[in-house]
């Protein structure tokens, strides 16, 4: 395979358009571009997550996710491309979710995103994943049902991994205290001490 990026800037996007994988030019605001752009952003966030100190198994899992996200991005960016993402990729995420979730206590309440550096980074990745999923659903063109399933499962996996890392970092989960707000008859919430 030859060099794909022999020149970094081309000036072809100065008019507000970009090229898809098949050569056609579309507006940079095209929903398809928004979808693969959000997936690229998610991939970059995962690269940042992996720069943290992670258990080897989780780092390897996230590296495989990054490769799958490149596959999805290529599919969306190239009209008519044969699918690159195998259905087994989604079932692999489900297996990882089940395996890691089995080690965690059940949740009765929502938890606040945060914790130590690795757990907090995974929560940021989870929200970036949800945005990528929304963008992919909005684009529809070039987005397969398998792409949507993968992104949906991936956000679940990132949530579970954040909980796993929170425990490994020796921190407890902070639960959302939704009962801290008392609603008087006027309808506006007043703070209530917890």
Image (tube, grey):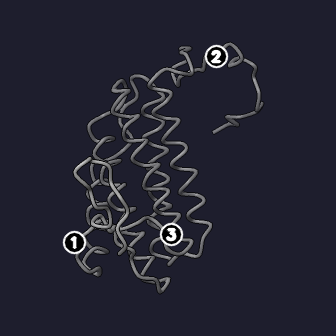
Label drawn at residue 90 = none
The residue sitting at 52% across, 25% down in the picture is 21
Residue 96 position within the rendered picture, expressed as x and y whole percent measured from the top left: 31, 68
Judging from the image, what secondary structure is the residue with disc 2 in? loop
Q: Earlier in the sequence, mark 1 or mark 2?
A: 2
Q: Are marks 3 and 1 in contact (CB under 8 Å)?
A: no
Q: Are marks 1 and 2 in contact (CB under 8 Å)?
A: no
Q: Which residue is mark 3?
A: 59
Q: Residues within 10 Å of mark 2 (few under 14, many from 20)?
A: few
Q: Are marks 3 and 2 in contact (CB under 8 Å)?
A: no
Q: Which residue is mark 2?
A: 16
Q: Nearer the viewer, residue 14 or 87?
A: 14
Q: Nearer the viewer, residue 23 or 136?
A: 136
- State the CA–CA distance, disc 1 to disc 2: 48 Å
Of labels 1 and 2, the one closer to you: 1
Q: Earlier in the sequence, mark 3 or mark 2?
A: 2
- State the CA–CA distance, disc 3 to disc 2: 37 Å
Residue 192 position within the rendered picture, expressed as x and y whole percent measured from the top left: 34, 68
Of labels 3 and 2, the one closer to you: 2
Placement of 127 over or under 20, stated as above or below: below
Of labels 3 and 1, the one closer to you: 1
The quarter of the picture where residue 181 lies is bottom left
The quarter of the picture where residue 85 lies is top left
Q: Residues within 10 Å of mark 1 (few under 14, many from 20)?
A: few
Is 116 left, or right, of 97 in this rendering? right
Q: Which residue is mark 1?
A: 108
């Amino acid at each position: 395979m030859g060099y794909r990026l022999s020149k970094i800037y081309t000036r072809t996007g100065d008019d507000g358009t970009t090229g898809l994988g098949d050569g056609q030019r579309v507006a940079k605001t095209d929903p398809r571009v928004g979808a693969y752009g959000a997936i690229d952003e998610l991939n970059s966030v995962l690269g940042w997550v992996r720069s943290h100190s992670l258990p080897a198994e989780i780092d390897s899992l996230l590296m495989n996710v990054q490769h799958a996200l490149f596959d999805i991005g290529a599919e969306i960016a190239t009209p008519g491309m044969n699918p690159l993402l195998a259905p087994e990729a989604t079932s692999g995420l489900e297996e990882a979710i089940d395996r890691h979730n089995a080690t965690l206590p059940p949740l009765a309440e929502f938890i606040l995103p945060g914790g130590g550096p690795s757990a907090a980074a995974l929560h940021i990745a989870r929200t970036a994943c949800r945005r990528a999923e929304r963008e992919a659903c909005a684009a529809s063109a070039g987005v397969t049902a398998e792409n949507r399933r993968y992104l949906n499962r991936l956000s679940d996996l990132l949530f579970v991994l954040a909980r796993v890392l929170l425990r490994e970092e020796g921190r407890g989960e902070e639960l959302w205290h939704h009962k801290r707000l008392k609603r008087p008859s006027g309808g506006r919430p007043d703070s209530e001490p917890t």
